[in-house]
Image (cartoon, grey):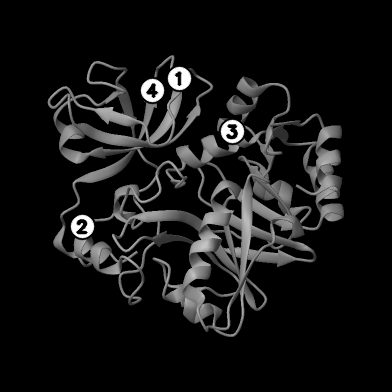
Amino acid sequence: MQAEWKTFLQNQGAEFDDADYVVGFGALPHERSLALSGTVIADLSHIGVLAVRGADAETFLQGQFTNDVRHLDATHSQLNGYCSPKGRLLATFRIFRAGDEFRLCLPRSMLESVRKRLQMFIMRSAVMLEDVSENSIRIGVSGPIVPGTLDELIAPLPTAVDELTRCGEFTVLRIPGVQPRYEIFGPSAAMQKLWGRLATRAAPVGSSAWELLDILAGVPTILAETADAFVPQMVNYASLGGVSFKKGCYPGQEVVARMQYLGKLKRQMYLARLQTEHAPHPGDDLFSPDDPQQSAGKIVNAQPHPDGGYAVLAVVQIGSREASAVRFGAADGPELVFAELPYALAGGDASSEA
């Protein structure tokens, strides 16, 4: 994190963990409650930015990722994924163009492993990879009055999810959310002024509250604990527009396409609430009483919910979800209470192009 920006946030009351991520602003339960229905502002330093540039950058990325980067233009971003040869996601991220380069936004904890793996396949291509996380500040804003509030400070705003606009020094991305939600990129001095003006109408929150909003929006984040565990359809990436089934080859493409066209999906990601004394973590196993010795699924992401317990995204066997209870940690553990996702799930046939 830039020292100047960290000092600014400390003066706003921010509390940090050992990785310099903003934990919160002194009132975590209240922050999470405000995030659900109020207007909040968050530092996004826990999200890193990997720049990909060079004459062959587009062609290279087109052959690596699940989505069609050729469709990216100056006014849109897209969800995308990086798979192993087995067709399982190694990382998920949002990508957009910034001039002549591409910017991948993904958890800081995942950035170096993704960079190293991509570097292995560049070979003689004219492609350069660089961690540019320190080059700009990233903040998130969410809430019912955000469009009107931001319109007074930054215009024009993107009006639909995945749209992108630029205004002076700012780049603004509209991202999925149960309420209007944006990510804003810009230099430190400009972002300090913007934060100061937004803070009169928005409450500052930590990374946990922002990640709770990701979960409630049904947007998964693959972390080290779940890397190489799920094909994209298992985490609803086809429904979220993170997969193209017409783009051509990439690592694992045959597995992903076969899953789509043959309709063999047996596991699906669901939104749920979980009451437990033991905090759930990505990769933790779930069980069904019908087969207590066999895992029926895994936690993808989890964050404390202000009404108690945890909000989770979980990949679960569809049969277990429909036939019996799904429980955390053991067949007699706490039961997941499933909730409705904020989007329709794509079908399993070839017509369900994302």
Residue 274, labelled with which disc?
4
Q: Tell me where residue 158 appears, x and y as whole percent.
A: 61, 60
Q: Amino acid at mark 2?
A: Gly
- Residue 348, which numbered label? 2
Q: Residue at x 66, y 33 (%)?
A: 206
Label 4, label 3: how far apart the Cα atoms are: 17 Å
Q: Secondary structure at mark 1?
A: loop
Query: In the picture provided, is 73 more to the left or to the right than 250?
Result: right
Residue linked to disc 3: 208
Label 3 crowd bin: few (<14), some (14–19), many (20+), radius 10 Å: many
Q: Amino acid at mark 3?
A: Ser
Residue that mark 1 sits on = 309
Asked if labels 2 and 1 touch by Cβ distance under 8 angstroms, the answer is no
Mark with earlier residue (1, 2): 1
Callouts 4 and 1 close, C-beta under 8 Å? yes
Q: Position of residue 43 (x, y in %)?
A: 70, 42
State which tag comes first along the sequence, 2 or 3.
Answer: 3
Give SS at disc 3.
helix
Dot 4 or dot 3: first in sequence order is 3
Q: Amino acid at mark 1?
A: Gly
Gap between marks 1 and 3, in whole Å?
Answer: 14 Å
Marks 4 & 2, CB-CB < 8 Å contact:
no
Which type of secondary structure does the marked residue at label 4 adopt? strand
Q: Residues within 10 Å of mark 4 (few under 14, many from 20)?
A: many
Q: Residues within 10 Å of mark 2 (few under 14, many from 20)?
A: some
Which residue is at a point 22% across and 20% down the rendered structure image? 331
